[in-house]
């Protein structure tokens, strides 16, 4: 049986490797599309794509959490409004050595939660009314430990960066698609323009799919890491496993956007949804099996 520490170490390495691949993909797209539009300007394309990535990442870094909370209609609460929830979050934060994050409530019968922010000092945790009603204390502690692990592991920053890079890829894709499919104005002129045009067409056809696959791969790694970290924090992986079982049996679907679905504790879209084909979460059955096989 692998130790939780081993799983955490492996997932950190794989996650950052995937981010580097994503960054390389964005730069490569900029290079190819620039070469199609005007041969010999590939470096300008890399600079432009990188500038877009940095600019959108800056916006996401400072305002991504506010947009995520607002889009999911999360409302902040004070300690007197739900003292038990506050106590759980505060105690787990002390154990994890983290500042207590701001706490939000989402009015929804679905059983779910998410964490967001740019670092532990600027973090928030949002839970649904459904999760407060359906879960026992040990199960709720497991879920909140998972979310605090996202904060402590800086997943909240990493996932915002990945989301920003994904947004840049989609932005470039739409600009090039609606701008005339690129290269058309050049009429095939210029050395090497042909091969770049072929690559560009492949990007038009498969670029968003490839970017989506990278995004979901990173998100899945971070979810596995947060499960391991959360189990390590509570020293009771069964609480988290039991919570996942209840979520799997929950028929309620959360009215979340596809742009924030990866932030949630579990995929907010139920089976049968088209979005489920590219779920940013590992299958719940696999998560439960991994948790019950951990030696913490």
Image (cartoon, rainbow, N blue to C red):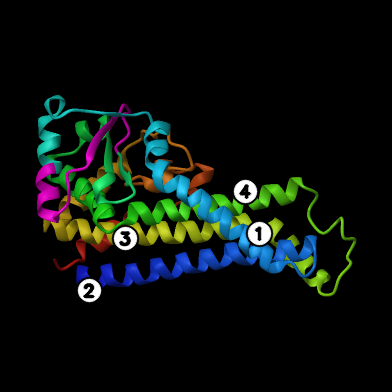
The crowding category of the residue bearing disc 1, from other C-alpha atoms within 10 Å (few below 14, some 14 to 19, many at least 20), is few
The residue that disc 4 covers is 171
Foreground tag (1 vs 4): 4
Q: Is residue 277 visible?
A: no
Q: CA distance from mark 1 to mark 4?
A: 14 Å
x 63%, y 67%: residue: 28
**Which corner quadrant of the image does residue 192 belong to?**
bottom right
Residue 288: x and y in percent read: 26, 56
Image location (x, y in percent) of residue 54: 51, 55
- The answer to whether residue 295 is above or below residue 248 is below
Check whether the beta carbons of the residues at disc 2 and disc 4 lie within 8 A of each other.
no
Comes first in the chain, label 1 or label 4? 4
x%, y% of residue 82? 14, 28
Which residue is labeled 3 in the image? 224
User: Disc 1 to disc 3, how far (Cα)?
Assistant: 27 Å
Mark 1 touches mark 3? (CB < 8 Å): no
Q: From the image, state whether disc 2 or disc 4 is nearer to you.
A: 4
Does dot 3 land on a helix, a strand or a loop? helix
Residue 276 is situated, as x and y percent measured from the top left of the image, at 48, 47
Residue plotted at (68% across, 60% down): 203
How packed is label 3: few (under 14 Cα within 10 Å), some, or many (20 or more)? Answer: many
Q: Quadrant of the C terminus?
A: bottom left
Q: Are marks 2 and 1 in contact (CB under 8 Å)?
A: no
Residue beneath disc 2:
2
Magenta residue span: 90-111
């Amino acid at each position: 049986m692998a130790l939780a520490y081993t799983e955490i170490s492996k997932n950190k390495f794989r996650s950052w490797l995937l981010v580097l691949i994503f960054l390389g993909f964005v730069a490569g797209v900029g290079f190819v599309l620039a070469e199609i539009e005007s041969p010999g300007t590939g470096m300008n394309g890399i600079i432009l794509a990188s500038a877009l990535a940095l600019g959108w990442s800056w916006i996401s870094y400072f305002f991504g959490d506010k947009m995520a909370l607002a889009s999911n209609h999360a409302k902040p609460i004070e300690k007197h409004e739900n003292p038990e929830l506050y106590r759980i979050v505060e105690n787990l934060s002390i154990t994890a050595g983290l500042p207590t994050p701001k706490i939000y409530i989402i009015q929804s019968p679905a059983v779910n939660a998410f964490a967001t922010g740019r670092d532990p000092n600027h973090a928030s945790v949002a839970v649904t009314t459904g999760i407060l009603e359906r879960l026992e204390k040990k199960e709720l502690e497991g879920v909140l430990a998972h979310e605090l692990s996202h904060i402590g592991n800086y997943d909240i920053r990493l996932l915002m960066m990945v989301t920003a890079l994904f947004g840049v890829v989609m932005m470039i894709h739409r600009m090039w698609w609606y701008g005339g499919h690129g290269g058309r104005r050049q009429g095939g002129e210029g050395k090497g323009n042909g091969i770049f045009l072929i690559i560009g067409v492949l990007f038009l056809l498969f670029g968003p799919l490839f970017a989506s696959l990278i995004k979901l791969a990173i998100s899945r790694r971070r979810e596995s890491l947060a499960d391991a970290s959360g189990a390590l924090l509570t020293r009771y992986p069964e609480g988290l496993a039991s919570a996942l079982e209840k979520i799997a049996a929950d028929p309620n679907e959360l009215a979340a956007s596809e742009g924030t679905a990866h932030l949630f504790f579990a995929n907010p879209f139920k089976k049968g949804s088209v979005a489920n084909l590219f779920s940013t979460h590992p299958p719940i059955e696999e998560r439960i099996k991994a948790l019950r096989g951990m030696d913490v």
